[in-house]
Image (tube, rainbow, N blue to C red):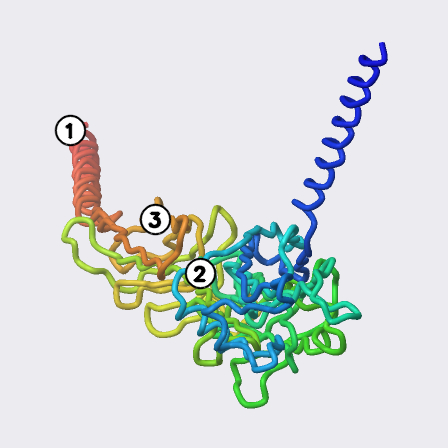
């Protein structure tokens, strides 16, 4: 019995030792500094982060060993205050340096790298729309005896230095006078003295802001015309980067509207103070218009006919208003515009109307050329917007008129002859009547 008890006790002791060893091994496998990266921009759906070793701590010799490719980027005291340009150049010249850890931030979520050894690490964050500075994390410290020990956690803020400004318009096939809605998306930069968004316009009115959101929160602001450039508007958001710059990395969404001026469409470019320029906006959107040309011809001879008049309606609505530019050329206009008219004239046989967007346009002939009849069917034109609009849309067609029929003149020569003959017959009949009556009396 005693022997059995001894065996059981030994077995229990063995199990306890194995359990304790398992805990110890597990702790050692996960124990180590954690690098936490915050302030990643939500502009990118995915931001890829990679960790590269710069230096390691040798506990046995209590020294820091810098990896070969990074030695030129350190100063003599091994302080992590080197120029990022030098580090990036050294990294690039080294060729294929393997990452010791990678992670993906989804929609700007914080990222943690755990279980790393004490040392120094370089972290690169790469997104499609935001450019970040290279980051460096020191994951060691020294105790009271001067020995290197691992930190519990090293926190880093991702520092976006520039970003791809995005620009969108809700319509690219537009009509003259149409109001178009635009959206600019940017990111608050890190450690910048100023932050401004620029909007360069061609054939557009001054932008009127609908809303500005920073990180989902509404802020105030307005576009102001640049004092030197008549087509440039500036939205000053420098207040967002002042002080502790808690807004760094947050998305900026500016929505606004502007009216299309003229019939040649519009061009709208945008950039911010982190990149781009007046001559080279980062992003640009273009709007186009449509035009229709109608030629009036004779149905029998194909001759071009002059002077026909029309009204033009869209999608079955009322007649549209136009302003005459020159003979046979008219631009779409508001009814309040001086000299606006609903009548367009094919003075030289053709009439062109410009500044149109998508829709079905009907030409109603209200006056035909001299000697011809009105074509009551008129003519339909349909301007369509496809998936993409990459230029103006021009349509042209012919409308044929028939000659007026030549009819006898009412009361003309034919009627006169019959009248004369009728009168003559009546006169002869009367003469015969009276002559017969006279002869009858003489016989009595």
Which residue is tagged 1?
443
| 3D distance between C-alphas at marks 3 and 1 | 84 Å
Q: Position of residue 298 (x, y in %)?
A: 20, 53
Please give the label number shown on residue 97: 2
Q: Position of residue 248 (x, y in %)?
A: 68, 68
Q: Nearer the viewer, mark 3 or mark 1?
A: 3
Figure quadrant of the N terminus: top right
At numbered mark 2, what does the secondary structure look like: helix, strand or loop? loop
Q: Position of residue 49 (x, y in %)?
A: 56, 57
Between residue 182 and residue 174, name the one nearer to us: 182
Which of marks 2 and 3 precedes in the sequence? 2
- Locate residue 387 relative to residue 143 in the image: left or right: left
Please give the label number shown on residue 290: none
Q: Position of residue 358 (x, y in %)?
A: 44, 52
At numbered mark 1, what does the secondary structure look like: helix, strand or loop? helix
Which of marks 2 and 1 precedes in the sequence? 2
Residue at (63% x, 54% y) in the render: 116
Between residue 160 and residue 196, name the one nearer to us: 160
Between residue 262 and residue 269, name the one nearer to us: 269
Figure quadrant of the C terminus: top left
Q: Is residue 66 above or below residue 396?
A: below
Q: Is residue 136 visible?
A: yes
| 3D distance between C-alphas at marks 1 and 2 | 153 Å
Q: Residues within 10 Å of mark 2 (few under 14, many from 20)?
A: few
Q: Is residue 120 above or below residue 231?
A: above
Q: Residues within 10 Å of mark 1 (few under 14, many from 20)?
A: few
Which residue is tagged 3?
379
| 3D distance between C-alphas at marks 3 and 2 | 70 Å
Residue at (71% x, 63% y) in the render: 149
Q: Is residue 178 visible?
A: no
């Amino acid at each position: 019995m005693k022997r059995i008890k001894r065996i059981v006790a030994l077995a229990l002791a063995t199990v306890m030792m194995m359990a304790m060893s398992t805990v110890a091994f597990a702790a050692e496998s996960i124990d180590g500094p954690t690098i936490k990266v915050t302030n990643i921009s939500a502009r990118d759906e995915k931001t890829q982060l990679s960790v590269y070793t710069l230096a390691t701590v040798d506990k046995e010799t209590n020294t820091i060993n810098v990896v070969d490719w990074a030695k030129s980027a350190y100063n003599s005291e091994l302080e992590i205050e080197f120029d990022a340009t030098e580090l990036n150049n050294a990294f690039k010249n080294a060729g294929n340096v393997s990452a010791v850890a990678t992670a993906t931030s989804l929609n700007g979520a914080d990222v943690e790298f755990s279980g790393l050894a004490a040392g120094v690490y370089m972290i690169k964050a790469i997104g499609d729309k935001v450019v970040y500075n290279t980051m460096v994390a020191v994951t060691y410290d020294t105790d009271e005896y001067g020995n290197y020990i691992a930190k519990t956690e090293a926190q880093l803020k991702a520092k976006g230095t520039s970003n791809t400004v995005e620009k969108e318009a809700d319509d690219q096939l537009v009509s003259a006078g149409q109001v178009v809605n635009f959206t600019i998306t940017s990111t608050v930069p890190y450690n910048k003295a100023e932050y401004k968004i620029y909007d360069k316009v061609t054939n557009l009115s001054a932008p009127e802001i609908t809303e500005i959101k920073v990180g989902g929160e509404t802020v105030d602001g307005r576009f102001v015309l640049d004092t030197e450039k008549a087509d440039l508007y500036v939205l000053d958001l420098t207040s967002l980067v002042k002080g502790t710059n808690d807004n760094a990395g947050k998305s900026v969404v500016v929505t606004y509207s502007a009216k299309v001026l003229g019939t040649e469409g519009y061009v709208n470019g945008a950039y911010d103070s982190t990149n781009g320029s007046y001559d080279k906006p980062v992003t640009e959107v273009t709007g186009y218009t449509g035009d229709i040309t109608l030629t009036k011809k004779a149905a029998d001879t194909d001759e071009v006919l002059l002077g026909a008049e029309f009204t033009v309606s869209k999608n079955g609505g009322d007649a549209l208003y136009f302003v005459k530019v020159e003979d046979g050329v008219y631009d779409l206009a508001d009814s309040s515009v001086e000299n606006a008219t609903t009548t367009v004239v094919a003075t030289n046989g053709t009439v062109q109307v410009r500044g149109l967007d998508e829709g079905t346009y009907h030409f109603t002939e209200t006056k035909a050329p001299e000697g011809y009849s009105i074509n009551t069917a008129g003519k339909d034109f349909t301007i369509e917007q496809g998936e993409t609009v990459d230029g103006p849309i021009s349509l042209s067609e012919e409308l044929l008129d028939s000659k007026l029929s030549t009819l006898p003149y009412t009361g003309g020569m034919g009627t006169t002859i019959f009248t004369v003959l009728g009168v003559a017959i009546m006169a002869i009949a009367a003469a015969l009547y009276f002559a017969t009556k006279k002869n009858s009396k003489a016989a009595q």
